[in-house]
Amino acid sequence: MTDIQIRTEGRAGRITLTRAKAMNAMTYEMCMAIDSALRDWRDDPGVALVVLDAEGDRAFCAGGDIADMYRTGTEGDYVYGRTFWRDEYRTNALIAEYPKPIVSFLQGFTMGGGVGIGCHGSHRVVGESSKIAMPECGIGLVPDVGGTFLLARAPGRLGEYFGLTGARMTAGDAIRMGFADAFVPEDSWEAAKAALIASGDIAMLDTFVARPPEAGLTPEAEEVINRHFGGESLGDILNSLSSDDTETAQGALKALRRNSPISMACALEIIHRLRQGTPSIRKALELEFRFTWRAMEHGDFLEGIRAAIIDKDRSPNWQHATDGVPPVAMSMMLRPLGKDVLTFDDKETGMKIGFIGLGNMGAPMAANLVKAGHQVKGFDTADVTVEGATSVATAAEAASGADVVITMLPNGAILRAVADQIIPAMAPGAVLLDCSTVDVESARAVAEQAENAKLLPLDAPVSGGIGGAAGGTLTFMVGGSERGLAKAKPLFEIMGQKAVHCGPSGNGQAAKICNNMILGVTMIATCEAFALADQLGLDRQAMFDVVSTSSGYSWTMNAYCPAPGVGPASPADNDYKAGFAAELMLKDLRLSQQAAESAGAQTPMGRAATDLYQTFVEDENGAGQDFSAMLPRFSKLNG
Ligand code: NAD
């Protein structure tokens, strides 16, 4: 991903936002990449701490990327936004509760989504250019990403002031407000990072810390704020400010008159509710999510974005007058979400998975998911069961309520038929993950159908065979969105050792078909060369010793040698009992020819390999034998 760089250096996990042109605005994919890196590093003894920074001078991160939320929201699709917020908030909690130090360097603007990742870690560094703000009430949201947790713990009534007005904090203000911990002059940031990375010792940071500059807010201004922002309701605060001519009071009043009334009323209520007990990040996020979940449908969010970002007319048409938010409207936005409540289950376990097609590949893949702690509902027309998975009677039943539905089926026609049954049963936002090998056209048709139903489709055929499925070492070639990939990533890590993102829907199948066309062609070339060597009186071992270290080497020669007793152990040593059956090779070669024909591509070697495997399987009893049994076939024909 070009928007973020994730790597380990020295003793540190390093995350750098590299979307400087867009002020490092946080996309869903960036957020999920951070989430997954932090989970990987949590138990990695090589990572002592995490350094989180961003490229560019203007901003650490100026907020969440709301373009897609606006687009989908105006189309009446609220699922994207809700999924984004839900997953982002879980990442915010993960950062706040992380067991290792996270050091963030917050230059320029840190706002909204930037606060969510930059201001919950253990060591938050600000410098001369830092400007931190929670301006959400200006676009019809409430301060979220855990911002209300920080606001509720700020001194006096400063939390209410900064949360409702969206005013910017300087470095000094941010430290006083609890949004930052340490001031380090920006010209020593690189040295500070280098020391942390080399040592893995968080105490190194202290050597760079300087006295923070004066807070931007004067003690007089703070006194004015505390006097007016202690009101019970937004109306109380407005009344109180109206009676004060000071610059601070009038400035605050002006900001409040600009922002969304329902957002400010609810933000105030959330801060008050958090203060009633001991504020916690989870409680704050749970309350914020009640608002954001409803913000597009019932709040001012879409209108706020229109006025601020789309039309830029800066004259939003809010639902309520500044001093006229009915209490019932506020309670409606903040009432509990029932089954949609924000939870903080560890996303790596406890996913609800529907698994359809429990054959040679599907059964061991499903078993690995069960072992990893996921709840699997399995269905197969052949009545197969997998230990620990719940067997259900229909494909639709397996799909209903699942976070991810996995299909592992014989071909594209069956996949299409199963898709017709399961897509209507799946919840919007769920992932449809097809791991079968099918034609590109079927993969793209099913993906389109799934997208129309607001699902996240992925085509992710595998290589690695039955052994890879049992051992959890498959390679997945994935077509589909980054969002879908991010959601399915924990499952790929259980079922396999590698998932390569190949582009949009269908590209996973395209990669698989191209790979297996090379495999079929090279297996035939390897087998015919061995048979030729026999005819020429060249010893097979000598042939292997030369070719496996010369320019004719290939996976089929070096790792899967078709000559018995030569090279590493392979099906040839087991009387060609199928590891990868010849008829499956034929299936994949036919898919390659079908794809080549529809794409207008010339594949003469692929054609020849298809014809040869077809003859072998259909006319020469090759079905059931390994695809490397082409060698005895050629030997027989050569006499
Ligand atoms: P398989 O025939 O053993 O399993 C397919 C399963 O799907 C069977 O159990 C069958 O009963 C079930 N099924 C068929 N129609 C169904 C329906 N309508 N609803 C529910 N279940 C249904 O095949 P496999 O070897 O497990 O391969 C599965 C897929 O993986 C294929 O697309 C194959 O090309 C691909 N693949 C296989 C290998 C391998 O080495 N076996 C390697 C890579 C990829």
Image (cartoon, rainbow, N blue to C red):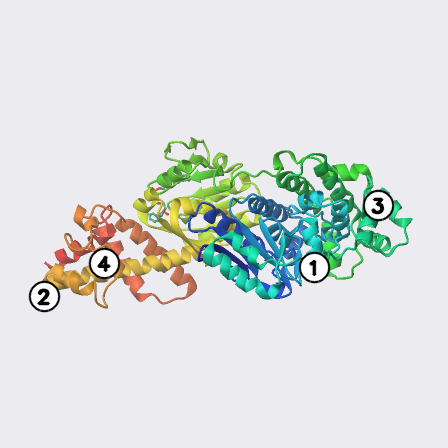
Q: Distance between the residues labelled 3 and 4?
A: 79 Å
Q: Within the displayed image, which quadrant is ligand 1 positioned in?
A: top left
Query: Reading the chain from its start, which is encountered first: label 3 or label 2?
Result: 3
Does any portion of residue 124 appear in the rendered image? yes
Q: In this view, does 74 lie to the left or right of 507?
A: right
Q: How far apart are marks 1 and 4 (CA)?
A: 66 Å
Count of numbered tags: 4
Q: Is residue 360 above or below residue 387?
A: below
Front disc: 1 or 2: 1
Numbered mark located on residue 213 in the image: 1
Mark 3 closeness class: few <14, some 14–19, many ≥20 residues within 10 Å: some
* Residue type marked 1: Pro
Query: Reading the chain from its start, which is encountered first: label 1 or label 2?
Result: 1
Mark 4 closeness class: few <14, some 14–19, many ≥20 residues within 10 Å: some
* Residue type marked 3: Arg
Q: How far apart are marks 1 and 2 (CA)?
A: 86 Å
- Taking the view exactly as shown, the residue that stands out farthest to the left is 537
* Residue type marked 4: Asn
Numbered mark located on residue 558 in the image: 4
Residue at 17% over, 61% down: 544
Element at label 2: helix
Percent x, y of residue 493: 42, 47
